Image (cartoon, rainbow, N blue to C red):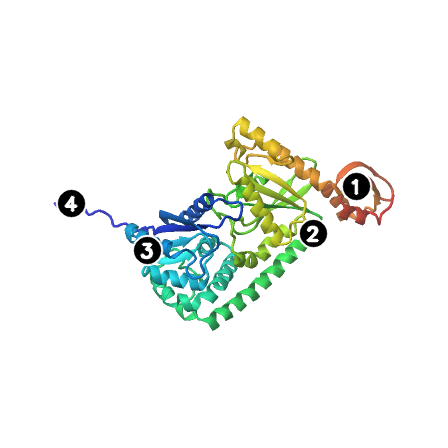
Amino acid sequence: MSARRAPTPTAPERERAILVGVELGRGSWSISDSMDELERLAETDGAEVVGRLTQRLDAPIPRTFVGSGKASEIVDEVKRLKADVVIFDDELTPSQQSNLEKIIGEPTKVIDRTALILDIFGNHARTREGRLQVQLAQLQYLLPRLRGMWSHLVGEQTRGGIGSRFGQGESQLEVDRRLVRNRIATLKRELVKLERQRDTRAKARWDSGVWRVALAGYTNAGKSTLLNALASSDVYAKDELFATLDPTTRSVDLAEGRHVTITDTVGFIQKLPTTLVEAFKSTLAEVSAADLILKVADAHDPNMNAQIETVDEVLAQIGADGIPSVVVLNKCDLLDAEERLLLEQAHDGAELVSALDGSGLESLRWRIAHEASKGDSIVTALIPYEKGMLIRLVHERGQVVREEYGADGLMVTARVSAQLAAVLASYPA
């Protein structure tokens, strides 16, 4: 009787990656921390990191980004470790990428952090708008690289893997300058239509008087888990980079009776590609249109302060830096008592919470309610009974202090928003 044959593995083999970083002595991230993050990005995209190389330079080398000696070292490591892809921690120019590909030789690919992030976004986008935004960013990145990447792309379409999914399924014939430009124009038109629909929904929320809160934070800081905890919802949350790309809005009723919406959107990261920021502007508009921004950071991460700086930089890019904000330090369940005390002293006014075990959430809800009521005033109005919708709005959107039913209507005294107070001014007591 013949022995049973072992089943043939069907899972794709993980690509072996070598990471390359250059320390330029600028920025708040150390080269070690930046490379650690690059490794997490590579692993999120399905690679197995087999080596890391770094070099300290005053400025990148124009021809190959790294020095000639380091380039030779990369070639040796690629051969020794049988690497499939070399990933640079900074964005390469088209000529630098082309020159490095010639030096390292086929079939090893050379990509940069930007291409890696775009690839991850391509895998994680779920909604139509999200997929269109990713396609646009990918094609804008690809367009200036077409000449140098032509033969590279022909090979990669059959091999697949990291950095080869640009165009999200477009045929090889479309990888042409004219056709790519046409596709970019088409994507922009489609996104403008979707943006108009989003603006209509946003205006409806504004007209309703609902106070809007937006979550903005570094990727993997626990924003989706926090949204679930505050709204008792089941938004997808996973311990990986860029688990959530598409904006999600949930309603929350605060203890004082105020009704607010909280929106979670794409997480930020250092060296976030400018093409992505531009492509995702309609999504990030949810943050720009908020009344309050909760800047969420991972309290247990040693780079927490640098992460908050990165969030501030992106908020400034999209014109949201002037919106009132509250720093929310999440994952405090991972801190001991001394670490928590030091954090409270260093970040006065921040809310320390754990979306996982619920600690600090009541304080955060109270803080949101306090921020929401800053523009409130107490008004007294005589509302005619036929204005039933306005009476309902006062009960739903305000805090009723006293009310009395009379012959001419409802005499009500309530704490309301500035917007609702302006409406009630037409019905003096």
**Which tag, 1 or 3, sits closer to the chain's start?**
3
Inspect the image, locate mark 3, and give the three-letter code of the amino acid beneath it: Val
Residue 113 as seen in the image, left or right of residue 203 = left
Q: Residue at x 84, y 43 (%)?
A: 381
Q: Residues within 10 Å of mark 2 (few under 14, many from 20)?
A: some
In the current view of this chain or complex, which residue is farthest to the bottom? 178
Q: Nearer the viewer, mark 4 or mark 3?
A: 3
Above or below 330: residue 16: below
| Residue matched to label 4 | 3
Q: Residue at x 48, y 52 (%)?
A: 58
Toward the viewer: 97 or 328?
Answer: 97
Q: Residue 275 in the image: state x and y as whole percent.
A: 53, 59
Residue 113 as seen in the image, left or right of residue 9 = right
- What label does residue 377 carry, if any? 1
Quarter the N terminus occupies: top left
| Residue matched to label 2 | 206
Above or below 288: residue 94: below
Inspect the image, locate mark 1, and give the three-letter code of the amino acid beneath it: Ser
| Residue matched to label 3 | 75
Q: CA distance from mark 1 to mark 3?
A: 69 Å
Q: Residue at x 82, y 40 (%)?
A: 412
Q: CA distance from mark 4 to mark 3?
A: 44 Å
Q: CA distance from mark 2 to mark 4?
A: 70 Å
**Which tag, 4 or 1, sits closer to the chain's start?**
4
